[in-house]
Amino acid sequence: MWISKVDECAEIYNWNDRQTVHYALPKLVGHAKTWYQGLPTIRHSWKEWKVLLRESFPSTENYAELLTEMLNRRARPGDSLELYYFSKINLLNRCKIFGHDSNICPKRSNNSNNGNVSSKNINDNKPKSVLEVSINDDSNDKYRVGIKINGVVIACQVDLGSQATLVRKADAHKIGLQWDTVQGPLLRGLGSIPYVPVGKTFVTIEIQDIREEQVEVLIVDDSLINIPVLLGHSFTERPNLRIIKTATDLRFEKVDVSGEVKLLLVTVDDFELDIGGLRAVTVGAKTNYSGSIYVGGSIRGKPDREYYLLPGEYQMTNGVCRVLIQSLSSKKINFCKDALVSRARTTFSQDRLLDVLQINTELVNESHVNSIKMGERLTISEKDKCQALLSKYKGCFSTGLHDLGYTSVAEMEIHLTDTTPVVYKPYRLSHSERAYVQGINTSIHDVTKRSPTELLFGRKLGNPSQGILNNVSEEILISETNEPIEQIRSDASDRIKENQNKNKNRFDSHRKSPNKYKEGDLVRVVRAIVSGSGKSKKLESKCQGPYRIKKVLPNDRFIIVDTPLTRKGKAYENVVAIDKIYPWMSFDAPSYSSSDESI
């Protein structure tokens, strides 16, 4: 936005390249000004400056959040009409939503009891303008299907992200639905604008010969959705349904979940679990089930008897298996016989498993290792060590196309478009993140006067493709430095220590040592709660007292008690920090004491 305004000013006032740089860059403030002052050189054209500014300060504005802010902008109490208007226009311009003709805005109907017609002609024969006409099928057509609600066919849009199933009010009347009026839940649509449904009911939905009963649907106003039915999670997330989605098709299938059985796992014998101990415990179920079960991990047990059940799939034989339990209590935990440990469920049966292609996992054999060519400079012992190393890590190397991908089922043909090798490991960062990290590694630090790359390797980057700041500093184009790396690091270490001492002195110059207190000293304490007597608090004292120090605690903490001047009932005693107390004034007048007022 700022760069665009500078370009507009340059066009209006006929600035050349040097004038644009001269007038624009001194206007930088904040982090941009600090970045500009720390650059090693400023010899760049305005075109190069724009590239550097965009790379150093990328725009992170979220359009969805900006659109939501624009929609939620309302006239606040006390705002003038001009302030609200220009604030709204500013948000619209940031969203790139500009003005349009008023004749395309929808007109409110003027129908009344005397039969007046709408101000908009229904039989308007004016040709309509469209942006695009496509004869190809839309890829989202697979989500538009026909369903039956209580036996009545109706159009539907499948929304796998919607948490509720919605029906328009007019279409609900057409198919004869009866609903109950509700005050929630609060729904949110485009732009996160909340609205409340009209009502709620339960229906029977049939889609692709799959029938589901007691499906919860919400009735909404006709203006909120542009389709009769929006099918959401109340139908699509049922456990006995499976959805298969391809690029052109959306298919629903019934899944048999009757084979899944929940089991109660109880202890077979008494046992004791030590503090922090991990133990494999024998548990049983009141059934002779044999097969795999799944146990979910969670923290269980009463207070001071907490234990963690490690999640995973366990093998049960004749209703008995062993599970891993770890103690989280500070005491020993005793388990009695037949005590409930956890609940488990059986895993999928074999008929629900999918077949996959056979994969050959044969690794490099010894013959390939022995055939590796080595240089003549290596001795026999060095060759033996090299072969032993390659044999130990033979799974990390490929000796030919026969083990590429660890399969020989099909041939693989790779067409290369560049000279970049294809056998390296996938990079961990994206290309944009790499460029950002390279920029950090090639930037000259303000304290060390060196770049991180120079401190690590003892040289500056010489390849222009290795750093994004090579166009900024001509010094980075120097391939090597004449100084040894030990001297470079020693100089950087000295500069860091000098800067640390300077920062410490600057910090200490605005601080002072705290006052020293001992037992029996009178102090005044910062008021924690200002009295609400209704009087003006402007002239009230910020501290109250006197209080007497009863005991000195570690870490600059003190136990204080009240004195006869501050006592208003029961004896007061509290712990305060040193920054909350100040010395009490000393008096030369004689002190009086009595046995009932001693503290």
Image (cartoon, rainbow, N blue to C red):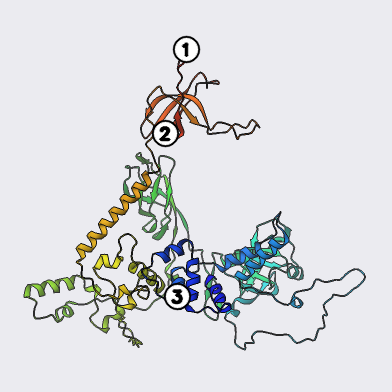
Residue 157: x percent and y percent?
Answer: 63, 73
Disc with the residue nearer the chain's start (3 vs 2): 3
Q: CA distance from mark 1 to mark 2?
A: 29 Å
Query: Label 3 near label 1: C-beta < 8 Å?
Result: no
208 up-or-down from 62: above or below:
below
Q: State the residue position of label 3.
A: 51
263 up-or-down from 565: above or below:
below
Q: Is residue 322 toward the left or the right of residue 396 in the image? A: right
Quadrant in which residue 333 is drawn = top left
Local crowd size for mark 3, using a 10 Å CA cut-off: few (<14), some (14–19), many (≥20): few
Q: Could you say which is closer to the camera, residue 245 or residue 255?
A: 245
- Label 1 vs label 2, nearer the camera: 1
Q: Amino acid at mark 3?
A: Val
**Residue at 41% of width from left, 29% of height from top?**
558
Q: Secondary structure at mark 1?
A: loop
Local crowd size for mark 1, using a 10 Å CA cut-off: few (<14), some (14–19), many (≥20): few
Q: State the residue position of label 1.
A: 592
Residue 521: x percent and y percent?
Answer: 41, 23
Q: State the residue position of label 2.
A: 578
